Amino acid sequence: MLDLEKYKFKKYVFIVFLSVIVVVIFWLKTVDNISLFAPVEVRINAGMGINEIAEILSDAKIISSKFIFKAIAFVTFSADKLRPGKYLFEGQLSIRNIINFLIIGGDEEVTVQIVEGATIYDIDALLSKNNIIKAGELISFNEKQEKSLEGYLFPDTYRFFENSVAEIVVKKMTGVFDEKVSKMLIGSSTNQYETLILASLLEKEVPEFEDRRIVAGILQKRIANKWFLQADATICYSKEPTPCYPLLALDFKVDSKYNSYMYKGLPPTPIGNPGHQAIQAALTPKKSNYWYYISDPKSKKTIFARTLEEHVANKLRYLQ
């Protein structure tokens, strides 16, 4: 009789336990829905446990409750199956969706170097080649912005995850720009955007820092005297994304705001993404008696001239 009562008690405890589990599962089903209005990228490192993962997801506003996330992970026996990698979360999600993504595993990181002077077209091609974004995605994203991103995608070495989106890539690159450049521009008495445009010209046209300062002075002097800038680099940009060289006579006749042989003043946007040195040169232009300059194709040295006659002689000597 005692054994029968003991059996009935165990059966009762088991039923109660099972009922509690069922109630918890149904309760969790009603509270774990999440809506993300913008893509959110997180990185889970190897060796992270459920508590660290819950902390990362909570900080990124991907989950609203660390307790519920961990409870579902334990109830579904998933807590020790979550894998490292990059994860991109967006749209309508549930915690169980998130856990399933974490079980499948994330994307790998890729290191890319954005060189000084690279245009948004160059960057789009590099990132798509490395499977970071889809081809044309950065260009398309830029076209939707009120102001061009050109000039704000700071050249540096970056680590991106495969299968990212343009918004995440731009956020990281403009973040580096804010960190390394914004203070320089804010502390300047010159127009910040015009400085950035000028720096992009210097980056493309002149390799040496001191020569860049002289050319910055020449270009500013030309603008003040309402001269055409006549910078070949602007013609190249007007041809993007097609290759620049060789420049043909017809290229100089294209009716584009970037054609500095046809329109006076600076182009409407930067013509690439300048590095720290080019920006510094634009901020510290050097006065000189020069009005003209060319680049020697062999030595890459910048050749200056005071008069049109000197300039023509330099072109005949170095360019023909």
Image (tube, rainbow, N blue to C red):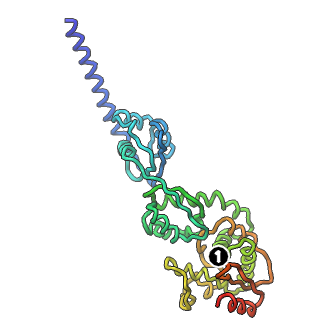
| Residue nearer the viewer, 290 or 59 | 290
Q: Split into 4 quadrants, where in the image is the N terminus?
A: top left
From the top left corner, tell me how far across and down residue 303 is, in percent: 72, 83
Question: Can residue 88 be seen?
Answer: no
| Residue nearer the viewer, 174 or 109 | 109
Task: Using the image, determine if residue 267 lies above or below residue 127.
Answer: below
Residue type, numbered disc 1:
Leu
Q: How many marks?
A: 1
Residue lying at 65% horizontally and 88% vertically, measured from the top left: 319
Q: Is residue 176 left or right of residue 288?
A: left
From the top left corner, tell me how far across and down residue 257 is, in percent: 57, 82
From the top left corner, tell me how far across and down residue 286 is, in percent: 78, 75
Q: Secondary structure at mark 1?
A: helix
Q: Split into 4 quadrants, where in the image is the C terminus?
A: bottom right
* The quarter of the displayed image where residue 23 is located: top left
Residue lying at 57% horizontally and 88% vertically, measured from the top left: 252
Q: Is residue 113 left or right of residue 35?
A: right
Residue lying at 37% horizontally and 33% vertically, measured from the top left: 74
From the top left corner, tell me how far across and down residue 262 is, in percent: 61, 88
Q: Is residue 69 left or right of residue 304?
A: left
Residue lying at 64% horizontally and 76% vertically, measured from the top left: 201
User: Which residue in the structure is indicated by mark 1?
Assistant: 201
Q: Residues within 10 Å of mark 1 (few under 14, many from 20)?
A: many
